[in-house]
Structure formats: structure tokens, C-alpha cells
Amino acid sequence: MSRLAATFAELEKTGRKALIPFITAGDPQPDFTVPMMHAMVEAGVNVIELGVPFSDPMADGPVIQRASERALDHKMSLRKTLAIAAEFRKTNQTTPVVLMGYLNPIEAMGYEAFANAAQAADIDGVLTVDLPPEEAEECTALLKARGIDPIFLLAPNSTDERIEKMDALGSGYLYYVSLKGVTGAGHLNTADVEQKLLQIKAHTKLPVGIGFGVKDAVTAKTLATLGDGVVVGSALISKIEANLDNPERAKNEICELLSSMRLAMDSEGA
Amino acid sequence: MTEKYNMPDVRGHFGPYGGLFVAETLIPPIQELNAAYQQYLHDPEFIAELDADLQHYVGRPSPLYYAERWSRELGGAQIYLKREDLNHTGSHKINNTVGQALLAKRMGKTRIIAETGAGQHGVATATVAARLGLECVVYMGAVDVARQSLNVYRMKLLGATVVAVESGSKTLKDALNEALRDWVTNVDNTFYIIGTVAGPHPYPAMVRDFQAIIGREAKQQCLAQAGRLPDALVACVGGGSNAIGLFYPFIDDESVKLIGVEAAGDGIETGRHSAPLCAGKPGVLHGNRTYLMADEDGEIIETHSISAGLDYPGVGPEHAWLKDTGRAQYVNITDTEALEGFHALTRMEGIIPALESAHAMAYTMKLAPTMRKDEIIIVNLSGRGDKDMQTMAKREGIEL
């Protein structure tokens, strides 16, 4: 069983939901990321999405765009992101790490070389924003052969047919993009999410993580009741951006926010 | 070539290039667009409306003009200019925006968005949006807003909202990123009019089909005026829409050389250029696999060209395919050479070309003297130079 499958199975046993933070590797500087990952685990997260910086992050809002720019200013790359994940893994063998990014850095490395490098870094899942199932066959096969889960996105306008396609091709979990828009957008409608999750759940047994627009503990708790996990990204990176002169404070504020989300998600009632 | 050229395949692939590389939220609107496009492509009523607009609104057919004096001066092949500069709004871009706007209307979309580099596509989009009474938002890199202020003003006069994009390199690629972000947010009512033969399938094929009127006319006109097919076609290539528009109807005519001219900026060897076909390698950006300018980590690198319309790190996937198969060849022209082409055409024929088109002119000046006097070159004069007066004056130290 993959580390992701084991994590979701364990959570299900105890009736809890996954808290999944997203941070961009190397933001605001390369040595920030590994300690941040460990601190987030202590704050109660279950899976870490590690963003691979890209020059042209087309699906991201301004907050994550700027995170990419800061990381690239420090010459962060896919190769170095893998090194960060490997470093984290040295002292944490249980928390799954999912790489999230865009296709071109993987194209530049070559699919097979990338799959090998991801395996060597003990990566658990790969989510490539601009690689829909239509084009994903080759890359997905290489990852699966190495025990790495390919993670696919679902959107508010995804049809039954698309959901079944993702269910067949994806593993680990499915990432439900809870709104039409970019990361960090502000127009999340929980009633719509609830409706859509019913439809998605009718077509897949994979766990579903819900992300885009999750800003606080209240939203995290609400979404946790609708799916199997909650992804939070821009809200964390905003803390980094607000404390560029003091990364330690950024780390503490991120952990505080994640702890409050954890507490809310695990508490009974509304 | 023994079989008739028939690209792309049903999934939008030109060999390894093209395809559909977008985030999930864009899949449904792209499928909707593709279905509408496939339907109307063969719909006699749609085609009749498009043809009428091209004739009465755009002003087609555009002339194929025999540049007799310039040909004599260069002393080689006879040069014909396909006068896309004479179209309404001053470039070939309107051929495509008229077509896509008619599609948008039939699909019931109420809002149009576009990206633009030099502003020619933005103006052409704002123009058709004004005519159809549709809301229009044009994304333009902040650098381009500054160097093409005349076109920004034209778009605003036409009622469009022009958004200056401050992210990344603040040029065309960043405008495209921002347009994609808008589309993903407003998919329900918004039609994205992409201006070049790039982007996710079906855009590369669809924009080509709307631009192919250039080559269809040129072929007929050349046969009528010169009595035979041309020997070479020359067109500038940024994204590559004017070049594909000219080349496409000639692809099966093996005797006709197809030559695309990329922007070498300060020179290929300086790294400050916009020539992915000449000096880049394959990758994925903006929805398709094609030649790109990227570093070894796959990060897109900044491009440079004196012409905003060529200042783009990618190129249409069909050009990538035509390059790999050897059917077309791709060359490059520096900023300095392009300026020579600009001045030559202006002084020899009394036609001021756009700086983009000036790259094609400059290569023609190299090519024509190497050819026989009974040979024929058709050069795509894709746009007029009015928009570039400020850039030219500044370059020559003149205060306007």
C-alpha cells in the first residue's frame, strides 16, 4: 500500500480528515523549506504538497505566483525541489509528500529520468496542473510503475465521464478544485462544493481533497465534512509574504494557522 | 510528399507537438469550443456570414502587389507582397478575430478576452467586440503597454478594458498567462480569442483555418498575375499565425519553399532573441507542446525583439512539425537587419511595414539576390507600421 493510501486509510479508521498544506519549495529561501515541512507535521498535517516553482504558473493566483518568483530568484528548480523532499524524508518516513507543479520542468528533465529521480527522492505523489488525462498516459505509467501516485484535478464543471476517467487513471487521492478560478481566489461557495462532492463520490472510491480558496479554520472545518481532506496553500504563503524580513515568524504563524485548522477539523459540531 | 497533408490528428497533435495541456477547469470550455468549431467549420450559413464579413468589413481580398522597383533593385527573384497591412485595423489579425467572434456569438458568449503583444490582435479583437456589442478585456504586458501606447489608446477608444500585466517578464507570454487565469475564472460567459496558432487544441488548427484565406488568395492571385505558382513564401514568425495563414494552402505544392523568419533580437549568439525554432528546444507551455526558449530546468526565459509581436518564447506547434519534417525552413533576422528591411520597403515602394513584417522584408533582401529573375517570392506584409512610429523615432533619437 502506498504511503498516501495508508495515510487516508488510517484517517478513515479514526474518523478524521486529512489536512494538506501546500508550500512552494525554496520560498522565501531554499533553507526555509525542510524545517517548515517538519514543523507542519508537528502542527498536525497529514500530507504535504510541495510546489515546484515555475516561471509561468498559469493556474495560480498572485500569491503563489510571487512565491514561485521568490523561489526562482534563489535558482530553485525541480532538481532542487527533489533534493528538499529527499532531505525531509531522512527524518520523516511516514508523511506523504506530493509534488505539485507544471509540466515543462518535467519535460525538460525527461519523463523517465523524472520518474526515477522522484522514486529516488521517495516522492509519494505527483500532481501536474497542466497535464490532463488526455496527455498523461506515458507519464502516469512511468510513475505508477515506481509506486508513485499520479494525482489528478477535478473542477466544478467536470462531468461524470471526467470523474470516471480520473478515477481510472489517478490514485492516492483526487484534488477537487472547489471554485472556477485560480489558487487563492475568494469566492468559495460551500453549498456548491457539497453538491459537487455528492456527484464525485458517486463515481470514485478514491479519497477527495478539496482546495482553492481555503483561508481559515472555519472554512477548513466545513470542507472537511464534505470530503476526505482539505488543501490550504495561498493562506499559508501569505504568511511568508507578510514576514519576508522574519522567516521564523512566518513559520510560527503558518503553524498557528494549521493548528487552528487541525483543531477545528477534529472537533465535534459546528 | 505523396499523401495529402492532413494535420493535426483528432486530438490536436502535429506529430509530437500540439495537444491539450491545460488545467482541468478549462477542459469543458475547450471541448465546447471544439464542438462548436467542428460544427460551424462546415456550416454553409456560418461560412457565408464569415465570407461576407471578410469582404465587406475587413476589405478582402487583400491585393497581391508586385514590388517591381524593389525586385529590380535587388536584382534577383520577382517579389510580390501579400498586402495584409491593408486590412481593416491594419494587419492580418482581423481575419481570425472576425471568425472567432462569429463563433462566440453563435455559442452565446457575452464576454470576450484576448492577449496581445504589439497590440494588433488586441485592436482586432476590440474592433469585433465593439461591432457585436460584446464586453472586451485585453491583457497586455506592462512593457508592451509602454512601447505600443498608440494601440492601447485605440483599444480603449473601441470600448475595451486594457489590463497591463505586471507579472513575470511583463510581455506577451505573461499576458497569455493572465488571459488564461481570467478564462478559468469566467468560463461560463467568456470566449477567449487567442491571436496566434498556439494554445490548446483546437486553437492552433482553428486560427490557422481562419488565417488560411491569406494563402488561398495569394495562390489564386499569383496564378492569375504571374501565370504560375511562386517559388518561395516568406513570412515572419512570432506565434506564427500570418506565416501559417500563407503557408498552409501551399503545403502540398512541393515546389514552393516555405520560409519562416524568427526574431534574432540582438543576435542568436547573445541569447537576447525570440527564436525558439532556430535556437530553442521542445517543451510545454500555454496548452501545447512546441519549441520553446527555456533554461535547462525548464523555466521559460525572457525573450527579446524590437517588435513586440515577435517577443514570445514559444511558437505554434504546426511550425514545430513543419520544421522537424523539413517541409518549412526557419531562419532569423536581427533587430538591426529588420530596421534595414523597414527602411528599404518604405523608401523603395512607399509602404511602411510593421516591425514584425520588416523581419520578413529583411530576409527577402538576402534571399532574392540568390534567386533567378524568373523566380517568384511572395512575402507576407502582415501589418502596417503606423503603430511603430514611436519605437522607430525613439531608436533614431527623434522626439515626436
Image (cartoon, coloured by chain):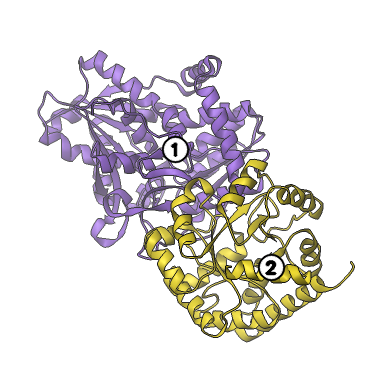
Chain colours: A yellow, B purple
Closer to the eye: label 2 or 1: 2
Farthest residue to the right: give it: A269
Using the rendered image, report if marks 2 and 1 lie on a common chain. Answer: no
Q: In the shown orientation, is residue B251 left or right of residue B126?
A: left
A70 relative to B269, above or below: below
Q: Residue at x 14, y 32 (%)?
A: B73
Q: Chain of mark 2?
A: A
Nearer-the-camera pick, B69 or B53: B53
- For marks 2 and 1, give the CA distance: 40 Å
Q: Amino acid at mark 2?
A: Ala
- Residue identifier under label 1: B12
Q: Residue at x 55, y 15 (%)?
A: B45
Q: Within 10 Å of the Cα at label 1, are there few (<14), some (14-19), or many (20+) other Cα atoms?
A: many
B41 relative to B27, above or below: above
Instruction: Residue A70: give x, y in percent of width and height.
Output: 52, 72
Q: Quadrant of the C terminus of chain A?
A: bottom right
Element at badge 2? helix
Nearer-the-camera pick, B47 or B372: B47
Q: From this viewpoint, is residue B256 visible?
A: yes
Element at badge 1? loop
- Residue identifier under label 2: A9
Q: Within 10 Å of the Cα at label 2, are there few (<14), some (14-19), or many (20+) other Cα atoms?
A: some
Nearer-the-camera pick, B257 or B34: B34
Label disc, if present, on residue B147 of the rendered structure: none
